Amino acid sequence: MVPALLVSLALLSQTGCDRIDITGKDTGVLDTSETDVDTDADADSDADGDSDADGDSDTDSDTDTPPVDEDGDGYTSDVDPDDHDDTVYPGAPDIDDGKDNDGDGEIDETVVCTGAGADHRKIQEAIDAASSGDAIEVCPGTYVENLSLGEKALTVYGAEGADETIVQAAVEGSVVTVGRTTGTTLRGLTFTGGSATNGGGINDERGTLTLESVVLSGNSASANGGGLYASSARLFVSDSTFSGNYAAASGGGFYVSKTTGELATSTLEYNAAGTTELTSWGGGGTIYAGDFDVTGCSFLQNNASDGGGGLYGYADYTGGLANTISDNLFADNWVASVVEGAEPYGGGINLLYFGGTFSGNTVLGNRSANDGGGIYCAYPTGDITENTFLENIADDDAGGLRIYVGEATIEGNTLEGNIANDDGGGMKSSHDRNTIRYNTFVENVTGDAGGGQEFDNETSVVEYNTYIGNQAGRGGGLHAWRNEGGIETLSNNYFEGNNATDCGGGLEFDSTPYYNIIVKNSTFYGNTATDGGALCVEMWTWDQDDDGVDDTTYYTYGKVENNIFYMNNAVDDGGVMYVKYGDVDFTNNTSDDNYGVASAGVAAKEDSVVTIDSSIFSRNAGGVVFWAEEVSETSAGPSTFAISYTDIWQSDSDVASGFDDPSGLNGNIDSEPDFTKPSDLDFHLETGSPCINTGNPSLKDTDGSRADMGAYGGRGGDW
């Protein structure tokens, strides 16, 4: 082939122009064949100095050069992929010459068609005749055959896409079996009707396989991977569809075991896993160990009998499932056990020993017959971040997100409109040491405890979360129970408009005597309950011998420090806080404009002890501010209050019932606190407030001065 530059040079020479050297410069030597002799080598080529030859002063040429057919194959350079090679042009036969003759991106493809004029009429014939590196183009049609690719690295593609190019199993077995190939690509094909032990549609063991724009539908497996099975392989799937596949054990759509690669931008719908005799997981798909990522996919209306209606991922050790699951949609998947003794967990997703990243996903409208309507995650150590859990349902615990024995980071998630029939409308976690922060819980509902969130034996870091409009029997926003593992701190959280039909509109905790729960630097605004409009602290009872009767009762201890309680409401006792069989230190808190029919501020029952120090109670209405039960309803003794260095101002009723009025005693005052702007939840003290430097003298503000009263005084006041 003559280089393009030399061809151009030859053409110039033939037209009688000045000779040009290899650098493109004018030599000034006249060609003897010229009919037009120039005295200035450049004078007539660019008279206006603008690099074109039109004579005007702009820099664009007004003369269009028409495309040419330099290689004489009948196609000009504007459409010819290579206009210097007459064997390359649109529609050229793709001969065995190492070139992409027809310009379709494939080299030396063999053509398979059901009609005449093709290289082969069967795809398997073309595979058998091909060598590694070859491409096989398949014409539109339905090909009834089972394919075996062996170890060849081939590209097999449908010329008109998967809708028009269908491979249907001829006999029982996988539609496609892939050997230990170093790189096979299947593109634009539909695989259907396969039935095998593993991988009804495609079975890939130890091969490297790429699937692009394929459809796997109507395949089945008596064990794993109805649509696709891959083991110890390298697998890359994109823009594909898995629909209506079935596996008896696991992975209705796909099953990948110890495989690396990615499933991207694909749809998995109406796949199922399970029988009446076998427990099963992963209706849409199953991932076992390996490093197989799932990104940008949609899992729709898949189901399994035991776990992971949409997706199931598991490993055999902590952190063993270290993949990335991001930017996917899991919608309307479900688990509903039909096997006796099975425990269906995770309507949308079920992950075991997950140590990877689950982020940016939308988990919508999934359902579990047990725990985790949206997702069930056991022994996680990875990151669950920036996801949306919306309108999922659990027949037992955790409508949106269920965590069991985890050390995960759970951050930036939104859980909204989820429902649990038992505990944890939005989320439940048990026996965990997670970091839970910057999450939003909105309008989740549960039949028992923890409308937004439920903790069971939890010692996690819980901070900067928002709980709005959640509903429960106990702990409308959050409920914490049986804290046995260590001190649990709930800090910098926001509770607004939550409701409990029993106790603790914003928060309830009932723990053991071994460790404290600390609630600090948080805001409780407009929460409601029968008792404890904002906060409820109760005893913990336990059916220790499992006879159906609670026979063990533990005292509950807690610290409530540097919080704001504003416009909370109790239908009965404790607009701010209700304490039953507990011991609570209430220090440096601000309680303004709360309401309780029997007691507007704090109510204490069943031998409770409440210590209030350096706090503010202002404009609280309804019943008395502080109510102590004098005669217990049980064998417990009367409850007691110790109140010091506290501002008790403008009460709607008496200050105390069940003990002497503490006003004017032990450093207590009765003065307007002078807040900056309560309607904007700004309860900082204005200059000159009587609550500045009048808190407990043994407590110091962060600047070293004597503590102020209220939420911004004392050691935790800088928030």
Image (cartoon, rainbow, N blue to C red):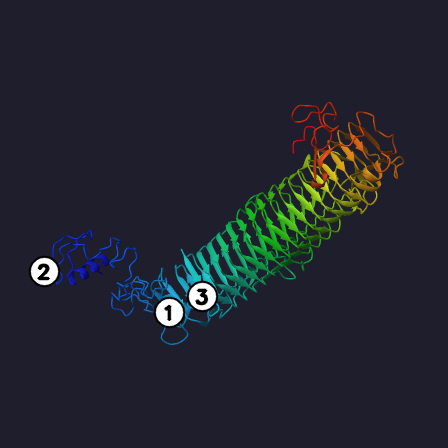
Please name whichever residue, 187 or 34, is drawn nearer the observer in this view of the structure: 34
Query: On the image, numbered disc 1 is attached to which residue?
Result: 111
Marks 3 and 1 close (CB-CB < 8 Å): no
Amino acid type at mark 1: Val
Rate crowding at label 3 as few (under 14), some (14 to 19) or many (20 or more) other CA atoms within 10 Å.
Answer: many
315 sits left or right of 154 in the view: right
Q: Is residue 683 left or right of residue 624?
A: left
Instruction: Rate crowding at label 1 as few (under 14), some (14 to 19) or many (20 or more) other CA atoms within 10 Å.
Output: many
The residues tagged by marks 2 and 1 sit, at their Cα atoms, a distance apart of 55 Å
Which residue appears at 53% of the width and 65% of the height?
217
Q: Which is closer to the viewer, label 3 or label 2?
A: 2
Where residue 632 appears, as percent x and y from the top left, is 88, 37
Quadrant for the C terminus in the image: top right
Few, some or many residues within 10 Å of mark 2 (<14, 14–19, 20+):
few
Residue 57 position within the rendered picture, expressed as x and y whole percent measured from the top left: 28, 55
Q: Tell me how far mark 3 sits from mark 1, CA to CA.
A: 16 Å
Q: Residue at x 46, y 55 (%)?
A: 236
Q: Is residue 685 visible?
A: yes
What SS does tag 1 mark? strand
Check disc 2 and give the amino acid type: Thr
